[in-house]
Amino acid sequence: MKKLILLNILTTILISCQEHPKADALVFNAKIYTIDSAFHIVEAMALKNGVILDTGSSDYIRRMYRSEVNYDLEGKTIYPAF
């Protein structure tokens, strides 16, 4: 049991020490229409070199990526394909 607890603690430390990928910009608090097979609507996206790296909730994108440029769109709509 002690080994399992120690393993969990070490895993948590290693995960928290990982550097988050750097994006050129983060866009969050938006209504973003995707062009995937289900036409999902997401809240946020990470951008690098003009390409969408990832999409998801605002919390997820801000937790997983770092950027010096952050855009809070206050609920505005984005159509990435246009």
Image (cartoon, rainbow, N blue to C red):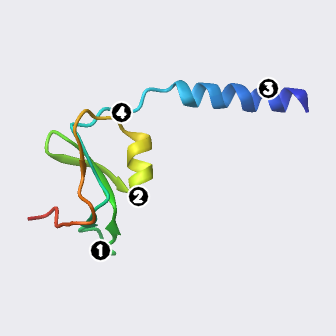
Above or below residue 24? Residue 81 is: below
81 lies left or right of 7 = left
How far is mark 3 from mark 2, CA to CA? Answer: 32 Å
Identity, as a three-letter code, of the amino acid under mark 2: Ser
Identity, as a three-letter code, of the amino acid under mark 3: Leu
Name the residue at 41% across, 32% down. Answer: 20
Above or below residue 74? Residue 4 is: above
Residue, far right: 1
10 lies left or right of 58 = right
The percent coordinates of residue 38 (x first, y second) are 34, 75
Above or below residue 16? Residue 27 is: below
Q: Which residue is label 4 attached to? A: 21
Q: Which residue is label 3 attached to? A: 6
Identity, as a three-letter code, of the amino acid under mark 1: Phe
Q: Mark 4: few, some, or many residues within 10 Å (few <14, many ≥20)?
A: few
Going from the N terminus, do you reach mark 4 or mark 2 first? 4
